[in-house]
Amino acid sequence: MPVHKKEHTTPEANHRTSKSPTPDLPTPEAFHQHLRAQIREATRMAMEEIMREELTLFLGAEWGESTPGRKGYRNGSYPRDLATSSGPIEDLAVPRDRAGQFHTQVFDRYSRYEPQVADGLTQMFVSGTSTHKVGEVAQTLMGVAPSASAVSRLNRSLTEQFEGWRERPLLAHYRILYLDGIHFTVRHGTQTDSTIILTALGVDLEGNKDVLALRACAPKRTKTDGSASYRICAIVGSRRLI
């Protein structure tokens, strides 16, 4: 009777078959892509909120408000796409009035002043909103200086939306957590600085990637001797991560 030969296995062979593949490390461009997706959503938030404020100024009345000088009434919104340097934004909600006389300036002005607006939104997204920064972005997109009450409303609304992203619940487990610093050029008035944005990128058990947290470091400063220095920053390991 023939004897079946026993297949010879070695510890190394067993180790190779049980070893799970190591995922590829994300490239700097991958980090940029995820960050650009977040900036697109920040752009959507800001532009839709500013267009609503623009319509309020056009009508001369808040939602449901009765004023002697009221020029018309709101009539929902219609979708419009916008091409940005961070990628396309689809179905922006553009408000309209019943008479069809309101025409927003936001799209034209965004195309003309995109670098300034993008810088402002990036700073707000990674560092938090401020009344001053919201006022700058609103004035750039509207073409006129918004009132103090309008800036306050915009600031409150944008803060709530940004904080909603920061406070969103995270998964209980991530397969991998990448921490990296991304260099961005950020405008400060008439000057630009090279700024490091610390990024936490999580990969879940199914391989999906998600930007978990962002933190802007102090900009690069050039010393009198020509050398450069950075303030040391860190992302704190907590539920919010920042």
Image: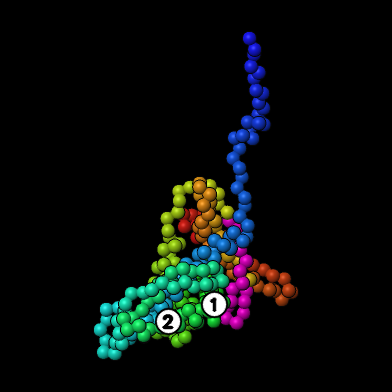
- Number of dots carrying numbers: 2
Q: Secondary structure at mark 2?
A: loop
Tell me whether the residue at label 2 lies in contact with that at label 1, contact meaning CB atoms closer than 8 angstroms.
no
Nearer to me, 229 or 90: 90
Q: Which residues are magenta?
A: 179-193
Q: Look at 64% across and 12% down and name the residue there.
A: 2
For the N terminus, the quadrant is top right
Q: Look at 41% across and 83% down and name the residue there.
A: 103
Circle 1 packing at 10 Å, graded few (<14), some (14-19), many (20+), is some
Task: Give the label on residue 72, or none.
Answer: none
Image-quadrant location for residue 112 = bottom right
Q: Look at 55% across and 57% down and name the residue there.
A: 200
Q: Look at 42% across and 58% down and name the residue there.
A: 168
Q: Which residue is mark 2?
A: 104
Task: Give the label on residue 114, or none.
Answer: 1
User: Where is 59 relative to 164, above or below?
Assistant: below
Report the Cα–Cα distance between label 2 and label 1: 16 Å
- Identify the residue at the far right of this view: 225
Q: Earlier in the sequence, mark 2 or mark 1?
A: 2
User: Where is 108 relative to 87, above or below?
Assistant: below
Q: Is residue 88 left or right of residue 9?
A: left
